[in-house]
Image (cartoon, helix red, strand yellow):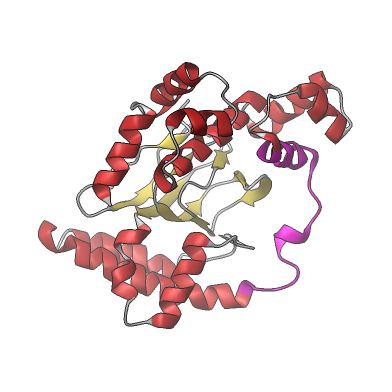
Amino acid sequence: MKFIENIDLYSNNFLFTFRAQRKHPGQFHAHKGMEFIYIYKGTGHIMLDHRMYELRSGTLIIFQPYQLHRIHQDDSAEYIRSYVVFEPSLFESYLASFPSLRSFFYHLWKDQLQNQIFYDIGPDHPLVHLYEELQERKHLVPDHKLTEEYGLFIMRFLCLLRLLWAKHENPDAPSVRSLSQVERMMAWLEEHYNEPFSIDELSKHVHLSPKHISAIFRQKTGGTLTDYLMAIRLNQACLLLKTSSKPVTEIGQEIGFTNTSYFCQFFKKKMAVTPYQYRKQFLELV
């Protein structure tokens, strides 16, 4: 299971997929870039920041870089979506002359967001039309000019999203509801990921037997408690390798690995490179 998707953003630092239909295995994962995804058809649920949300047709989702999430599609339903994934730091220059829009972009990129999922966005919404227009432009514009097209897409998308955002800012947002049992488990794991895992301590926290919580978690998420815990640790490792100069040994210990050798083996198995190579690759992009 790969927790951090090593999405190829190509030379334009931008990936665009239009009306994809192939289903993918629902697993906890994160992207290196920011993602805007629109669901034309689909049913299921979304797990994001230890919360569970409904997935249905007409859903728009904003994922931040390295934000752990999982989309589970119902087996019997179609799943059609368009999405863009991009490296935000390489497109912020397009917003230099628009301070208000740039501030909104930074908010999406770096702040703790109250709401990232928008429902009932019909196929005729201007935001959805932008995906269709980009698909048409992609086949008309020479490859060496695509970066500009992608930058314009992001600016137009942000302008329309900001209007949508303002309409959905209200005190009844989903984040105020109480946590379900599985969400409480995920929240506990996110709080204690850097400690030796104790299913007994978790069971005390949610007031269920160890056997029961394992069964409930798998039933509701499709994965195991260990899957989620290791996904959190790997996600944190990637962030620390990118944003700090801490030694690899210290990073491993900080995220819950007492053995540096095992940490490096685990990281390479999931990321296809060692922690040292991962940091070197990132520094070469800066």
Residue segment shown in magenta: 168-191
Q: Is residue 60 above or below residue 279?
A: below
**Residue 27 visible in the current orientation:** no
Provide the major secondary structure of the magenta segment. helix
In the rendered structure, the answer to whether residue 128 lies left or right of residue 143 reads right
25 drawn magenta: no
Front residue of 83/229: it is 229
Say which residue appears at 51% left-offset and 68% top-offset.
Answer: 107
Q: Residue at x 56, y 73 (%)?
A: 165
> Where is residue 44 drawn, in percent x and y?
61, 43
Q: Quadrant of residue 77?
A: top right
Q: Position of residue 101 (x, y in %)?
A: 43, 78
Horizontal side, residue 256 vs residue 238: left or right: right
In the picture, measured across the screen, residue 100 lies left or right of residue 93, that is right
| Residue 164, horizontal then vertical, whole percent | 54, 74
Residue at horizontal 39%, vertical 53%?
83
| Picture mark count | 0
Within the image, what quadrant is residue 189 found in? top right
Q: Nearer the viewer, residue 185 or 70?
A: 185
Q: Is residue 6 visible?
A: yes
Can you name the residue that lies furthest to the right here? Answer: 207
Query: Residue visible at 44% across and 48% down?
Result: 80
Residue 263 position within the rendered picture, expressed as x and y whole percent measured from the top left = 48, 22
Relative to 94, residue 20 above or below: above
